[in-house]
Image (cartoon, rainbow, N blue to C red):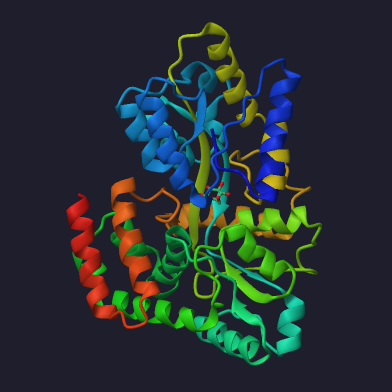
Amino acid sequence: MHWWTSGGEARAVDTLKQMMQKQGDTWKDFAVAGGAGEAAMTVLKTRAVSGNPPSAAQLKGPDIQEWAGMGFLTDLNGIADAGKWDSIMPKRIAETMKHDGDYVAVPAGVHRINWLWINPEAFQKAGAKVPTTLDEFFEAADKLKAAGIVPIAHGGQNWQDTTIFESLVMAMMGPEDYHKAFVETDEDTLRSDKMVEVFKTFKRIRNYIDPDAAGRDWNLATAMVINGKAGMQIMGDWAKAEFTAANKTPGKDYLCVVMPGTQGDFIYNIDSLAMFKLKNEANKKAQQDLARTVIDKPFQEVFNLNKGSIPVRNDIDMAKFDDCAKQSMKDFQAANDSGKAEPSLAHSMANTSYIQGAVFDVITNFFNDANADPKKATEQLVASIKAAQ
Ligand code: BGC
C-alpha cells in the first residue's frame, strides 16, 4: 500500500513491482492517491483495525514507531543482520526504521524538501535572476509576475502549504530553531518574533500564486513549471521525477536550486515500507523478499533514479545520477555531520500525526485568510499543538 500515483511516482514504484514479479512473487497494488499520504494513512487505519492490513505499507518517521508500539508490525532483524543494515546506511536512517532496537521497516530513498524548481526559459523571458537569498527570491517573483508568468506554482493543500512554510522556517530561523519548533514543539520558539516574521513572509507568497491554486495536486503544479506557465515551485524532489518522466534534463530544461537561505541545510524525508504481521506463510516469505529487494543495490539505484530521491545506502555508485541527486547526496552527508539535517514536519518525519495535523490547520487557515494576523498565528500554533499533545 502506497500513495505513489503521479506519473513519476508510478514509474518508480513499477521498478519494485517488476523486481518482485521476477522473483515469482505476486504484486497486488493498493495505491491511495493523495500527496504526502494523508488519505493513505486513513485507509491504512481502517484496514488494520478490521484485521485486514496490507503485507507492506508506505509508513514514515514516528508513525513507524507508533504502529510498531501497537503491535502491528513484524520485525525484519533476520534480513537486517544478514544484509548488515546497521553498517550500510547512516545511523539517522537506521534509527528511524527501528522500534525498541528491532528493524520494522525498510528504507527506500531519501527525499530533500528544501528545493526550488525553476523553468529557466521563463526566467529568461522575465529577465529574472536565479535567487540565492529570500530577497532575490521575491525579486525574481516580481519579475515573473510583471512578465505575465505565474511566479510560484502551488497547490492549496495543507501539506503543500506546510512544505513551503517549513522551508521558510529553515531559511529564516536555521536548523536549531527549526528543531526546537517542530521536533521539540518548544513554546518560546513557536511564538518567537522570528516565527512572526516567518508568517509575514509566508503571507507574501500569496501574492505570487495563481487564483486556481486551491486544491490543486502537487504534480499539476509541477506541470506548470515544466510547461512554462509558472516560473518556480517549492517542493521536495519527487517533483524531479515529473521532470524526468517528461524527458526533461536538469541544468538545461529545468533547474534544481536549494531553497534560498537554506544552502547547506537539509530537510529530509525518508520513504520506507513497513511490514505488517501476517499469518499466511507464503505472504510472509514475500514480505522478506520485498525487504531484501528494497535494500539491495539494484533497486536502490533504479528506484531512486526514477523517484527523484537519493539511495539510503552509503555504498551506491552515484555515476548514473544527475547533478541534483549528486548535490543532494553530498549535502545530506555533510548536513548529517554538521547537525544541519532536520526531519520534515509536512512529510510526517518530525513529529506525531496529531502534532502534524495541529500545525497543518494553523498554517492552512492562515494562508487562506488574507486578513490573518501573523502574531496571532503564532499563538494559535502554540495552542493548537498543546491541544494535540
Ligand atoms: C512522500 C513521497 C511522495 C510525496 C508526494 C511524500 O510524503 O514521501 O514519496 O512522492 O509525498 O506524494
The residue depicted at 46 percent of the width and 14 percent of the height is: 278
Q: Position of residue 62 (x, y in %)?
A: 36, 41
Q: Position of residue 12 (x, y in %)?
A: 69, 42
Tell how many labels: 0
Find the residue positioned furthest to the top.
Answer: 281
Vertical relation: 121 (above or below) 308: below
Vertical relation: 151 (above or below) 330: below
Residue nearer the viewer, 295 or 117:
117
User: Which corner quadrant of the image does residue 253 belong to?
Assistant: bottom right
Q: Is residue 53 left or right of residue 209?
A: left
Q: Position of residue 323 (x, y in %)?
A: 72, 59
Q: Position of residue 60 (x, y in %)?
A: 45, 41
User: Which corner quadrant of the image does residue 20 belong to?
Assistant: top right
| Res. 255 in view | no
Vertical relation: 309 (above or below) 223: above
User: Which corner quadrant of the image does residue 132 belong to?
Assistant: bottom right
- Image quarter (top left, top right, bottom left or bottom right) of the N terminus: top right
Find the residue positioned furthest to the bottom.
Answer: 146
| Res. 222 in view | yes
Residue nearer the viewer, 97 or 335:
97
